[in-house]
Image (tube, rainbow, N blue to C red):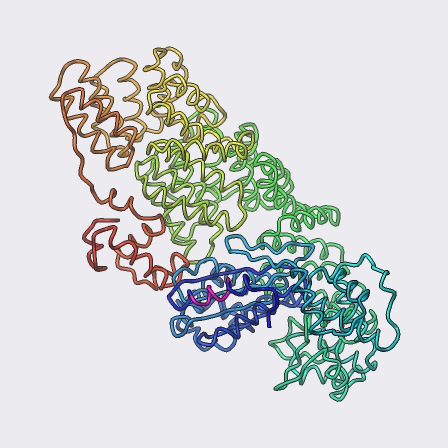
């Protein structure tokens, strides 16, 4: 019975009720040990009589076993793996050690968990409860939280109990319910019901010490009552400083040490390995001098229960106390006995960890066992388990170089697992353990990647430079990777000297002509030229890199380089094509951490090309993923693109709010993101006719460290602001640089923008018409039509002006560029027109959420709900929910009608 938890009980029961109507709930119940989290989860299980129930639990000592908890949770349903999409099925098989012929990624495992749970829920509403989630192995927790965040319209309830610990267990994106201590009245009622007869002073002491903690009330009350009856009660005025959890655990420890020694031993055995069945527990117990009958005393004391061949501790604190009150020698003996008992191929990882726990000094044989465990975990996608195994292997290594290499691998795996602090600490340690240049280089590169988010891209570039210099002669291809990091980070920071230095180091590498590393090196060398305002030698290598980036099987980092190279060349179509391939490959392989970087480039290209809706859709997914993965700098950069989009679509409140949010993160750290933000603010003022403010913002972009990046395309906006503000002479230098870039890039977009600038400066209709003859993005085309129409109206060429302005208005209307639309409308009104607009496909899609846009477009392309779900990492039922909500907005009733709307 739950005492004093009416509100919390109602919260959980409401979630269970909503599941029956197809509404998903994920809830994290937080609080200190003994506060009632397990009881609340147990109540949910009791109430959920019409639901399928899955129960899992985390055990602190088993957090190194990759996907162990997830395997136990899903074990009864492994026969359904064949029904999952192929890559997801293979991922779960690999994670659970059922297949060794594939290397998987954590996110495919998360997607497979999502799909499997969704299929179970399609048969019967599903309740999944996970107790002590803070002690799940990282792979299991990541997979379950990944799934929990993505359920929306499935009859699924996922409840996680999380104990407050020194290292917080973070669950971003999931609702939390914190359990406080019981009210004084509820606490007193619980104590009096279970421990009647306490003296008034002792009762007051228990209430004070327990601080409303139900487990403490029960255990301390029972212990004090027993002591009182035996005539050994402590003075009531002695209140020690111990926290509640420690008091309760001490109470359990006292009960354990009162047991016979052999009973203590068998409890220690059971506590040392949760995965061990009773046969193994008894085998190990006999090896340390205990037997089945020794369980009786612990059962009578209420510390454990044994039923159906399974031993269960009354509370996780009992398990912890059983392990901790044993001596070091006793624990070593138990772990050694486990290592001798666990010999089957499917338990080798547990054997390795027991060997490690029984080893107190360097031992290469044990270290090698742990390294093999790390390799197996790596194939299964359990990055944190990989890190733990390599770290312990390093500590047990005899050879100093092996120790350094293993700890370096532990550092990299920790970074992959989203533990940058641990990764940085291990990486720094590596540099003090070895003199091997390659090992130090890898550790230094990792430190740089961590510093990108922690301090600045410039710090990353500087460390990547150090790393590359160590191996540029011995391993030039690996040096390309490190110098790529250096140049990309230096470019982000606007640290042009570092970009130039990276180019010089690249030039000195011995690489095979025509190879991908050579093409990537040449492109990055050319970045240095282009970003320094020297486009004449940069274009050919960049164009070659763009072509490489569009091919199959390209390295993801090379694809990102190709994408940004395409932006620098104003080749939006090629950039979009390359990035769409990268996004598709990342989805198929489960490499979700690369999707935000690909979507960043894709969104920039789509925005500049005039496809605002698709850009916004990309950004919504990329921001959500980056937030989920803790990529704060990337979130800010993505939101800088949202500033630009809010500006061009006329949403001034959102534009300014986003700018205020991101500039404190980006300024003096990320030059490109900062420039993109100011470009958006400048466009906002330009559209509103605030030409002086627009000039100031745009001038900062066009004279800043990112001025020769793809941000060079802000120059035409600066020119327009200068002309309208009556100071065209102040942009001569910027326009000359832009013309030089446009001449060498020689793309229709660049040439058209250059012609538009000349038309404004020289007041030349010839240049307007030439610009409009070239194929550019829809926004740029509409902008040129507006300027041309205004020029024609001023010259009283009313008919021609009307045609140009109507075309501009139609373009702005389709794009949803409301402020620009208002300007075109105003110009037409001045001609005596009453303009009207009609909705087209893009306008209809604007009524949808970004996720609905994604789903509708994929459905229009003929994909099934299951196929769409696999791509977007959502359940098929959630896909159906999005379509159900989208149909009325689109004015359709059937899936087949989507293809007729032209939504691609």
List the single residue furthest toward the bottom.
293
Coordinates of residue 482 in the picture (x, y in percent): 57, 42
Q: What residue lies at 25% left-to-right and 50% top-to-bottom?
A: 889
List the single residue furthest toward the front.
200
Query: Quadrant of residue 184 in the image?
Result: bottom right
In which quadrant is the N terminus drawn? bottom right
Q: Say above or below: 163 vs 424.
A: below
- Could you say which is closer to the camera, residue 6 or residue 72? 6
Q: What residue lies at 46% left-to-right and 64% top-to-bottom?
A: 14
Q: What residue lies at 32% left-to-right and 62% top-to-bottom?
A: 865
Q: Does residue 98 show up?
A: yes
Q: Is residue 278 left or right of residue 573?
A: right
Coordinates of residue 507 in the picture (x, y in percent): 53, 34
Coordinates of residue 52 in the picture (x, y in percent): 46, 75
Q: Is residue 229 left or right of residue 39?
A: right
Query: Quadrant of residue 534 in the image?
Result: top left
Q: What residue lies at 88% left-to-right and 73% top-to-bottom?
A: 232
Tell me the magenta residue range: 11-17
Q: Say above or below: 312 vs 703.
A: below
Q: Is residue 264 left or right of residue 179?
A: right
Asked whether 13 falls inside the magenta stretch, the response is yes
User: Magenta-highlighted stretch: main secondary structure?
Assistant: helix
Coordinates of residue 241 in the picture (x, y in percent): 81, 56
């Amino acid at each position: 019975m739950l005492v004093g938890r009416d509100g919390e009980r109602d919260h959980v029961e409401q979630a269970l009720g909503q599941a029956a109507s197809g509404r998903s709930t994920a809830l994290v119940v937080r609080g200190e040990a003994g506060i009632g989290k397990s009881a609340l989860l147990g109540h949910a299980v009791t109430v959920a009589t019409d639901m399928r129930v899955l129960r899992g639990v985390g055990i602190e000592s088993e957090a190194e076993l990759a996907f162990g908890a997830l395997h136990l949770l899903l074990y009864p349903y492994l026969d359904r793996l064949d029904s999952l999409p192929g890559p997801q099925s293979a991922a779960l098989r690999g994670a659970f050690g059922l297949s060794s012929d594939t290397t998987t990624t954590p996110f495919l495992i998360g997607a497979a968990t999502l799909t499997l749970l969704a299929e179970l829920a399609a048969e019967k509403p599903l309740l999944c409860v996970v107790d002590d989630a803070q002690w799940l192995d990282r792979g299991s927790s990541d997979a379950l939280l990944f799934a929990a965040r993505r359920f929306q319209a499935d009859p699924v309830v996922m409840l996680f109990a999380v104990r407050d610990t020194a290292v917080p267990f973070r669950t971003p994106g999931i609702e939390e319910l914190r359990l406080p201590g019981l009210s004084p009245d509820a606490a007193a009622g619980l104590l009096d019901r279970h421990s009647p007869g306490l003296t008034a002073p002792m009762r007051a002491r228990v209430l004070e010490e327990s601080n409303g903690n139900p487990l403490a009330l029960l255990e301390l009350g029972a212990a004090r009552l027993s002591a009182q009856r035996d005539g050994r009660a402590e003075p009531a005025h002695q209140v020690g400083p111990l926290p509640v959890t420690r008091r309760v655990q001490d109470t359990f420890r006292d009960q354990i040490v009162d047991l016979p020694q052999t009973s203590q031993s068998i409890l220690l055995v059971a506590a040392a390995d949760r995965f061990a069945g009773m046969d193994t527990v008894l085998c190990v117990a006999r090896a340390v001098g205990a037997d089945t009958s020794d369980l009786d005393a612990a059962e009578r004391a209420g510390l454990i229960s044994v039923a159906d061949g399974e031993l269960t501790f009354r509370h996780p604190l009992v398990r912890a106390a059983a392990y901790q009150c044993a001596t070091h020698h006793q624990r070593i003996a138990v772990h050694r006995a486990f290592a001798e008992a666990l010999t089957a191929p499917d338990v080798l990882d547990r054997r390795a960890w027991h060997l490690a726990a029984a080893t107190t000094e360097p031992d290469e044989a044990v270290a090698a066992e742990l390294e093999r465990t790390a390799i197996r975990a790596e194939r299964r996608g359990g990055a944190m388990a990989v890190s733990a195994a390599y770290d312990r292997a390093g500590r047990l290594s005899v050879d100093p170089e092996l120790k350094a290499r293993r700890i370096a691998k532990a550092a990299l795996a920790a970074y992959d697992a989203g533990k940058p602090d641990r990764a940085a600490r291990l990486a720094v340690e590596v540099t003090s353990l070895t003199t091997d240049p390659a090992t130090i280089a890898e550790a230094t590169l990792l430190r740089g990647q961590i510093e990108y988010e922690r301090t600045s891209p410039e710090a990353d570039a500087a460390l990547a430079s150090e790393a590359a210099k160590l191996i540029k002669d011995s391993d030039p291809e690996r040096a390309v990777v490190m110098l790529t990091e250096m140049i990309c980070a230096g470019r982000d920071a606007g640290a042009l000297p570092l970009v130039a230095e990276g180019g010089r180091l690249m030039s000195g590498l011995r690489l095979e002509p025509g190879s991908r590393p050579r093409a990537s090196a040449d492109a990055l060398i050319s970045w240095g030229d282009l970003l320094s305002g020297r486009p004449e030698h940069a274009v050919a290598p960049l164009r070659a890199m763009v072509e490489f980036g569009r091919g199959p099987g390209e390295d993801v980092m090379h694809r990102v380089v190709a994408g940004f190279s395409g932006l620098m060349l104003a080749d939006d179509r090629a950039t979009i094509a390359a990035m769409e391939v990268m996004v598709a490959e990342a989805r198929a392989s489960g490499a979700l951490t690369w999707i935000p970087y690909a979507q960043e480039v894709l969104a920039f290209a789509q925005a500049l090309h005039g496809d605002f809706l698709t850009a916004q859709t990309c950004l919504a997914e990329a921001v959500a993923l980056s937030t989920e993965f803790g990529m704060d700098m990337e979130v800010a950069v993505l939101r800088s693109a949202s500033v630009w989009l809010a500006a061009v679509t006329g949403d001034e409140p959102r534009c300014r709010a986003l700018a205020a949010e991101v500039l404190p993160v980006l300024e003096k750290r990320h030059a490109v993101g900062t420039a993109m933000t100011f470009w958006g603010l400048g466009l906002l003022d330009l559209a509103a006719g605030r030409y002086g403010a627009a000039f100031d913002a745009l001038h900062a972009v066009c004279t800043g460290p990112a001025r020769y990046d793809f941000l060079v395309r802000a120059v035409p906006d600066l020119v327009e602001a200068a002309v309208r503000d009556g100071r065209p002479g102040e942009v001569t230098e910027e326009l000359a640089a832009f013309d030089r870039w446009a001449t060498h890039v020689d793309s229709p977009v660049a040439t058209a923008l250059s012609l538009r600038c000349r038309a404004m400066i020289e007041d030349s209709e010839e240049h307007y018409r030439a610009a409009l003859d070239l194929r550019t993005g829809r926004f740029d085309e509409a902008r040129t039509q507006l300027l041309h129409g205004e020029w024609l109206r001023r010259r009283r060429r009313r008919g021609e002006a009307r045609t140009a302005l109507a075309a501009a208005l139609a373009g702005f209307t389709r794009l949803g560029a409301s402020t620009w639309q208002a300007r075109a409308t105003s110009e037409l009104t001045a001609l005596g027109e009453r303009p009207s607009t009609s909705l087209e496909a893009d306008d209809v899609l604007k009524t949808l959420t970004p996720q609905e846009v994604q789903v509708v477009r994929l459905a229009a392309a003929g994909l099934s709900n299951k196929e769409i779900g696999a791509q977007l990492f959502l359940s098929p039922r959630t896909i159906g929910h999005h379509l159900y909500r989208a149909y009325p907005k689109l004015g359709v009733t059937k899936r087949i009608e989507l293809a007729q709307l032209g939504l691609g």
